[in-house]
Amino acid sequence: MADGGAGEGRPTRNGLKRAVEARLADAGIAAADDEARWMLEEASGLEGAELIAAGREPATHQEERRIAEMVERRLGGEPIQYVLGSWSFRGLDLFVDHRVLIPRPETELVVEIALEELARRGERRGASDPWTGSSSRYPVADLGTGSGAIALALVAELPDAEIWATDVDADALAVARANVAGSGALGARVRLAQGDWFTALPDTLRGTLRLVVSNPPYVARRAWESLPAEVRDHEPARALVSGESGLDDVERLVADGREWLAPGGVLVVEIGADQGGRAVAIARDAGYDAEVRHDLVGHDRVLVTHNKS
């Protein structure tokens, strides 16, 4: 699977990349150039300038075998994120596999809005400073954490927060645990707990949470079959589908949230592109101030509610 030989007829890394790119492009993969480069980076352990400098060197047997395996998985329809085994989320390199949803740009927006809401409340935002430390800790929850993407993105920018990251699924929580362990000092302020939404949290947190963030399932059951095959055939359905309306889990989060949020606390929830009106109505009926924020293409994307009590 390569052209451009070097040394005993072995392909160069550049030649290997060109061959992979051609196969992906022939299969109709739009980002063939990027994906070929990512595969070569994953197989070689080289990135950026290092990979450019080593591009004319012969690829190793191990690199060829690893890339061949990744190409076959990708041509079989598996998402590139699972093929690579990792994905970037707000600058964090996260381990991902079939046990968890792939972190997406829409969820990065959810994190940004959550951070803005806390900053508006006067909480410090920015990287932790080991010299100044923190005079106090306040609790924040990421419910349905999956890979741990939201929890780790929050803890990276909230130097005074302790993040409770929960998931009902033990397999998903194992992925989150691996990512927390790999996050270094940040992981010291992340607490993992298994359970169904708020029931996973210790009772001592009731009425104290300044922020709750969640990317819950929000696909209606009837819409499952219309999802792209790359999603439907590979990502966990339990993390995508939420009853007939798609809002069953949003309703639960809203209903239970008021007794767990501190007065003035904020609940920030990712929703579907056509769910804004219904989600706001659910939240206002439950006694919140509520609004919907839109994503970069103007779709409903984030339900933001404030606990008035």
Image: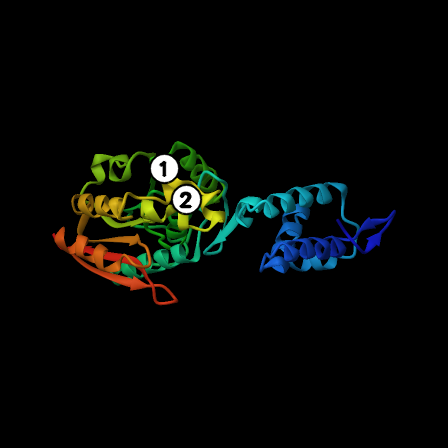
Helix, strand or loop under label 2: loop
Q: Is residue 28 above or below residue 191?
A: below
At x 22%, y 40%, the residue is 205
* Foreground residue among 123 and 39: 39
> In whole angstroms, how far apart are the C-alphas of marks 1 and 2?
9 Å
How crowded pointer 2 is (Cα within 10 Å; few <14, some 14-19, many 20+) is rated as many
Could one spot residue 226 in this view of the protein?
yes
Residue placed under numbered mark 1 in the picture: 192
Q: Amino acid at mark 1?
A: Leu
Check if mark 1's residue and mark 2's residue have beta carbons within 8 Å. Answer: yes
The x and y percentages for residue 241 are: 34, 44
Could one spot residue 124 in this view of the protein?
no
Q: Is residue 36 above or below residue 260?
A: below
Q: Earlier in the sequence, mark 1 or mark 2?
A: 2
Residue placed under numbered mark 2 in the picture: 148
**Where is residue 260, by image quadrant?**
top left
**Where is residue 293, by image quadrant?**
bottom left
